Image (tube, rainbow, N blue to C red):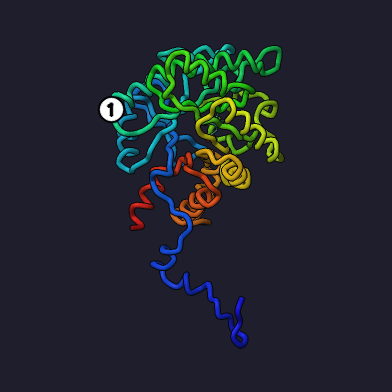
Amino acid sequence: MKVRGKFPVTRLRRNRRERWIRDLVAENTLSSSDLILPIFITYGVNKSEPITSMPGVNRFSLDLLEPIIESAVDHGLPAVAIFPEIKPESKTIDAKEAYNPDNIVCEAIRKIKNMNKDIGIICDAALDPFNADGHDGLVLDGKIDNDLTVELLCKQSIVQAEAGCDIIAPSDMMDGRVGAIRAALDEKHYEDVAIMSYAAKFSSNFYGPFRDAIGSKTLLKSDKHTYQLNPANISESIREVGFDIDEGADMLLVKPGLPYLDVLAKIKETYGLPTFSYQVSGEYSMLKAAINNGWLDNDKAIIETLISFKRAGADGIITYLALEAASLIENSH
Ligand code: PBG
């Protein structure tokens, strides 16, 4: 740095002195096209149920879905991600409701597609909403059976594709599932259905409120450490992603969000694929808890967390804040 007398000639503050110049030199921007809205759906009619551990987020029965989709379209969101709470009695240890072509996920997909809107639909491939023990995989003799689970995930992906799902998002972390799902989709001529692999999904405590939302928390007796990644590992996550890409993943997802920005940055830099981040339920709850206590400013905290994802290299963010953030972005212009 050049110095004249005791003062610097280069003054970084020149580019920060007014809002217009800060905007001019901004390295990253947040737009509604970066935001994907997760929607919790439930059985029954005329139900809009608050999820206690996620203040401000509700589960909706399918008859209430249309206005939410309309609002997502109006705000310019490119896609929604559907997560179901199914009837407790439909949860079985063989999770067969997962590949019932008339399950509520498929019904929701058809309903949204019938609206003929320009918005994408993303669906999980994982058994947990349908499994009596709350696991993403089939439990046999107390262990998660990898290969049997993959067979069911293929069936689940096919019924979702048949219903009109645009992007299958395997969130189960079984080995080999991306390749198997790709082959199963192609065999049925769903070559255009994309796979967004939850390639680096960590075994996180921050999924707790989501498990409340889909009704799997009290069922889940153990943890998911034998299939989800250890939060201590980054090299392993890079390896894991490499396999998913070789198997045909079109896009990648890193999850959770803020505590794993280092992983996100490294994966984007290493592979260069479209890479997304999921600001998960526990992150949402943590923020809103502080906001609702008056300890953080709602609007500023939301925008700051979301721009952090962009800075770390995310091409988009799945976030429960999508609609709220889109409104904030619109109002800031
Ligand atoms: C299930 C799944 C989970 C989330 C998305 N898909 C939970 C889990 O793995 O237990 C978490 C999302 C969130 O916490 O918001 N396979």
Q: Which amino acid type corresponds to the residue marked 1 in the rendered image? A: Met
Instruction: Say whether residue 102 is left or right of residue 282.
Output: left
Q: Position of residue 170 (x, y in %)?
A: 54, 26
Q: Position of residue 300 (x, y in %)?
A: 46, 56
Q: Nearer the viewer, residue 22 or 38?
A: 22
Q: Quadrant of the N terminus?
A: bottom right
Image point (30%, 34%), residue name: 67
Instruction: Say whether residue 198 is left or right of residue 62.
Output: right
Farthest bottom residue in view: 5
Image point (46%, 25%), residue name: 84
Q: Nearer the viewer, residue 329 or 221?
A: 329
Instruction: Say whether residue 243 is left or right of residue 213.
Output: right
Instruction: Say whether residue 119 is left or right of residue 271.
Output: left
Image point (45%, 12%), residue name: 100
**Residue assigned mark 1:** 115
Image point (43%, 24%), residue name: 193
Q: Residues within 10 Å of mark 1 (few under 14, many from 20)?
A: few
The answer to whether residue 90 is visible is no
Q: Nearer the viewer, residue 329 or 59?
A: 329
The answer to whether residue 15 is visible is yes
Q: Ligand 1: which quarter?
A: top right
Q: Is mark 1 within 8 Å of ligand 1?
A: no
